[in-house]
Amino acid sequence: MAKAIQFLIKLILAALVLLFAFSCSTKVKDEPAPSSILYDGAALLSSSEQDDILSLLTSHNNKGPGKIHVLTMAELPENTSIENYASDYVGAYINLDGGKQNGILLIADINERKLRIHTSKDVWELLKDEECVNIIDEIIAPEFKKEQFFVGIQNGLKAMIKELEK
């Protein structure tokens, strides 16, 4: 009887160790670097493509209007919608420019196959929701469907900048 109890205790302890090991090995979600205007967490872009996107973003962001950031995520944190993640990100990391609410975020959630352009209050009139939807539906999404991620992001950014500079 004592050996049976010892065996049962060892079995329970082994199960607990395995459970702990499994919980520690679960994938940690990619979190963007707050200071970066481009975070390619989904690894969609080559180094040279990232450089081209950074150049486009830097050129626009230095003169404005608006400060554009781009995030690609393999997947968002659990129980987080792309809308809430984008809003939180813009509020926390982009709208830090002297109190201005001029942040714009192009975000791609690859796992859920979702795209969003999120605009802050001070640029709503320059880049309206309707135009954001059109840019996604007509420019970015068709290229993403063909796995031409760089082309979709670059052309989407150019369309956003064109609207902002009107």
Image (tube, rainbow, N blue to C red):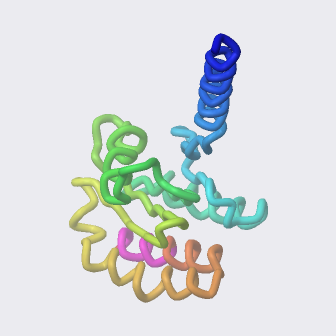
19 displayed left or right of 126? right
Residue at far top of view? 2
> x, y (%) of residue 150?
65, 74
Residue 19 visible in rendering: yes
Residue found at x 56% / y 72%: 153
Residue 45 in the image: above or below residue 75: below
Quadrant (top left/top right/bottom left/bottom right) for the N terminus: top right
Instruction: Please tell me whether residue 159 belongs to the stretch shown in magenta.
Output: yes
48 displayed left or right of 50? right
Residue 113 in the image: above or below residue 51: below
Residue found at x 59% / y 41%: 28
93 displayed left or right of 125? right
> x, y (%) of residue 46?
76, 64
Residue 103 visible in rendering: no
Q: How many marks?
A: 0
> x, y (%) of residue 157?
50, 71
* Viewer-closest of 145 and 52: 145
Residue at far front of view? 1
Residue found at x 48% / y 72%: 113
Chief secondary structure of the magenta span? helix
Instruction: Please tell me whether residue 137 belongs to the stretch shown in magenta.
Output: no
Residue 143 in the image: above or below residue 14: below
> x, y (%) of residue 163?
36, 75
Residue 154 in the image: above or below residue 74: below
Quadrant (top left/top right/bottom left/bottom right) for the C terminus: bottom left
Which span is picked out in magenta? 158-165
* Viewer-closest of 85 and 20: 20
* Viewer-closest of 108 and 155: 108
